[in-house]
Amino acid sequence: MDKEHLKGEAKKAEGHIKDAAGKLTGDRNLQAEGKLAKVEGEIRKKVGDVKGAVREAADRHT
């Protein structure tokens, strides 16, 4: 697991916490921040996947 994947997992965890806290307190803004953080985490994981694929392709061609 590379740095981008780790950042993605951390952001998703942050999002889950904010989303849950927003639901508990009725804070829609906090809940929205949580949902946004979860999406950002997924994007970071996908970026990590792309970087990994590019790295593997470059290694095969050298």
Image (cartoon, helix red, strand yellow):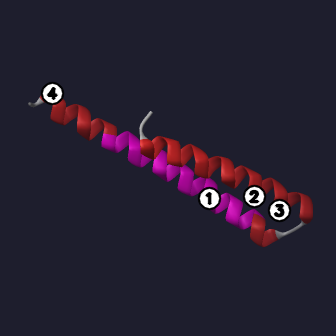
Given the image, on which type of amino acid does mark 1 rest? Answer: Ala
List the residue tagged with mark 2. Answer: 18
Q: Which residue is mark 3?
A: 22
Residue name at image x 8 percent, y 30 percent: 62
Q: CA distance from mark 2 to mark 4?
A: 42 Å
Residue 54 in the magenta stretch? The answer is no
Residue 31, x across and y down, in percent: 76, 63
Overall secondary structure of the magenta section: helix
Residue type of the residue flagged with mark 3:
Gly
- Pointer 1 residue: 37
Q: Residue at coordinates 84% horizontally, 69% vertically from top-left?
A: 27
Which of the 4 image quarters holds residue 58?
A: top left
Q: Which residues are magenta?
A: 31-51
**Reading the chain from its start, which is encountered first: label 4 or label 3?**
3
Circle 1: element type: helix
Circle on res. 54 = none
- Is residue 55 positioned above or below 28 on the image? above
Q: Is residue 6 left or right of residue 22?
A: left
Of the numbered discs 1 and 2, the one sitting upstream in the chain is 2
**Mark 1 touches mark 2? (CB < 8 Å):** yes
Badge 1: residue crowd in 10 Å (few <14, some 14–19, many ≥20): many
Q: Earlier in the sequence, mark 2 or mark 4?
A: 2
Q: Residue 38 vs residue 31: left or right?
A: left
Q: Is residue 22 left or right of residue 45?
A: right
